[in-house]
Amino acid sequence: LPIFKLGRQVHDEFGFNVEHVVDMREIVNPLSERLKANADRTLEIISELSELGETIRYKRAEAGKNPISYLSRCAEFLADWVNIKGSSYARYVKVEVDIEKSRRVRLGIRCLDPALAASVMNKLRSAILMSGTLWHTDYYIDVLGIDKNRCESIELPSPFPRENRLILVDKSVTTKFERRGEAQWKRIADHLQKIIGQINGRAAVYFPSYEIMHEVAKSSNFDSPSIAEERGTKIVDLLQFLKSHEKCVVFGVARGKISEGVDMSIGGRSMLSAVIVVGLPYPKRTELQIVLLKYFTEKFGNKAMEYANGIPCLNALAQSAGRLLRSPEDKGIIVMMDDRAAGRFKEKLPKDWREDMEAHYDIEKLSERIKNFTSGF
């Protein structure tokens, strides 16, 4: 089948779980050829399949069953694939591997413009957007397409005492693309072992990607029990692992399932004593990311790079670090393992982060600082 042929080409060039942007016709034309139909007739067939799917849903509902139809879902997706127009959408193909190690070719449509959905807020009398990481309000106003003239913002002080949090930067490592390699992965692994060795409790370590996590893991040897996030990892298993070990390490990926929206706490108190962010979690430079940057350039001009790469990186860092303190009584350590965090990137961080941040090039001094801080736990 053409889609499997395309999947093999994508895998051979990009590997697994990397989106390859395609033109709508790369799927529709081979489909029309197999159906021996022209473009108009292909659309009619898709519409007929959708109607048949609705009939299946109706009959299932009448029988007291869940009114779902995979045929209808497939037809609706194909209709969107053909009918959605404009540069605010991108179509892609990628190859995935499931838990059983089976390969699957996945088609997808990515909406590049959140404002297409979020701008509905402009029609409301009022709306409240609230988060502990709304660090750049102009970004959210612009990207969500909200009427700036109607917006008011308020910033409240953190309920967490600043003295309960130690923010450190390891300046002697980086995941910057030009400096990646086996020597860098070994250095990061060695520093991770020294840092985690000083932490009397549970630590979460977040990487920019699964690939970097696996590369560092090859050179790592931790005494504490550890669990690594994979694409099939279940949150319930992660939480059970944390509850079962008072001293352990959790490895995850920034923007992954265990770095955002997961409350690693018991009775309102955090289970973590440290969050370590390896590298700066900039979005991966994929074809989809390149298309997004191009779209943002057309829409936001010179803000495009910041909106497509800079602030998403900052948000991923903030979300990962946010797993640490969950109550005013919690204490913990945030370590950013990348020299760029103490450079120009530092100016993007909130004022309290900039004031509290301590940067060290010597890993022994950094480890000693952690030891002194944790001795008061």
Image (cartoon, helix red, strand yellow):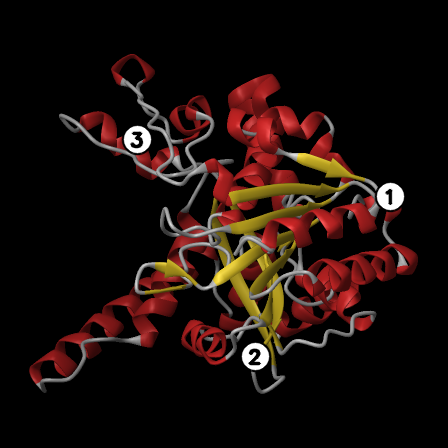
From the image, tell me which residue sits under label 3: 119
Q: Which residue is mark 1?
A: 178
Closer to the camera: disc 1 or disc 2? 1
Q: Earlier in the sequence, mark 3 or mark 2?
A: 2
**Residue on which disc 2 sits:** 98
Disc 3 marks a residue whose amino acid type is Ser
Name the amino acid, label 2.
Asp
Q: What amino acid is found at the position of numbered circle 1 in the picture?
A: Glu
Callout 3 crowding tier (Cα within 10 Å): few <14, some 14–19, many ≥20: some
Q: Nearer the viewer, residue 366 or 275?
A: 366
Discs 1/3, front: 1
Q: Regarding mark 3 in the picture, which secondary structure is present there?
A: helix
Question: Which secondary structure, mark 1?
Answer: helix
Is 5 situated above or below 307?
A: below
| Front residue of this view, candidates 111 and 349 | 349
Of 209 and 81, the residue lying toward us: 209
Q: Which mark is residue 45?
A: none
Q: CA distance from mark 1 to mark 3?
A: 39 Å
Image coordinates of residue 94 in percent, x first then y, are 61, 63
| Above or below: residue 331 compared with residue 15 | above
Secondary element at image label 2? loop
* Crowding at mark 2 (Cα within 10 Å: few <14, some 14-19, many 20+): few
Of callouts 1 and 2, the N-terminal one: 2
